[in-house]
Amino acid sequence: MSIFDEIKERVTAYDVVTYYGIIVDSKGMCRCPFHNDRNPSMKVDKRYHCFGCGADGDATDFVANYFGLSVIEAAKKLNEDMKLQLRIGCDKRLFPKSQEQIMQEKEQAWKKDVIRAFNILRRDAINILTKYHKLLWEWKREYGPEAMNEGDANWHPFFVEALGKLEHVNELLDDLSFGDRTKQLDVLETYGEEIRRIGERIKQFD
């Protein structure tokens, strides 16, 4: 049941018309406040109807027209004046969302989804690079020659990879971990495919 239906069940047009000082005779007739009515032309009971100007409605409609309010504000005024103790302010049925509000909520939800997806990609990239960084250090220690000789062509490939990649991986980890959002996004866009390939490759070393 809506708030308006609850008001209809508890308050009649007669109740509000007399409450706001309009005199109703024994036949339920009164002068219509909505036009220059010299003789009573408004019939008032559960609803009101003017035979002169055609004004018609229930208690909420009367208050809205009499005070120049929206039906929502009229319901609030009735609730307060008649001490109905209805929870109008909490009833979302009285406050339908505008198209602008709906679009704003959709945009906010979309932004949250984008941020959530970005954070997942960033987290996965950091995990991959952290594992790779650890591997590179192990390879540098385990496969490095006892005496480094730039002319030695027999260095182990893992050792060579460690020498070539450690600094680069360090920079990527720093940017993803401590860079601003723009920098993090740039890293993922520029090196995302490379990081994905590294992730596939290092699975064999788990």
Image (cartoon, grey):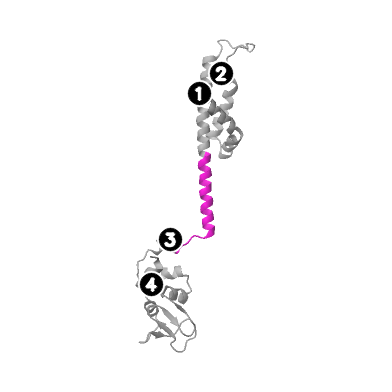
Residue type for callout 2:
Phe
Q: Place residue 63 in its image quadrant.
A: bottom left
Magenta residues (range):
94-118
Dots 1, 2 in contact, CB < 8 A: no
Mark 1 or 2, which is nearer the eye? 1
The correct choice, above or below, for 21 with respect to 175 in the image is: below
- As for residue 113 lying within the magenta part, the answer is yes
Decide: few, some or many residues near mark 3? Use Cα within 10 Å; few <14, some 14-19, many ≥20. few
Instruction: Kindly identify which residue carries mark 3.
Output: 92
Residue type for callout 4:
Lys
Residue lying farthest right?
151
Dots 3, 4 in contact, CB < 8 A: no
Residue type for callout 3:
Lys
Instruction: Kindly identify which residue carries mark 4.
Output: 8
Give the label on residue 204, or none. 1
For the point 43% across and 60% down, the residue is: 92
Instruction: Kindly identify which residue carries mark 2.
Output: 158
Give the secondary structure at mark 1.
Answer: helix
x, y percent for residue 148: 59, 12
Q: Quadrant of the N terminus?
A: bottom left
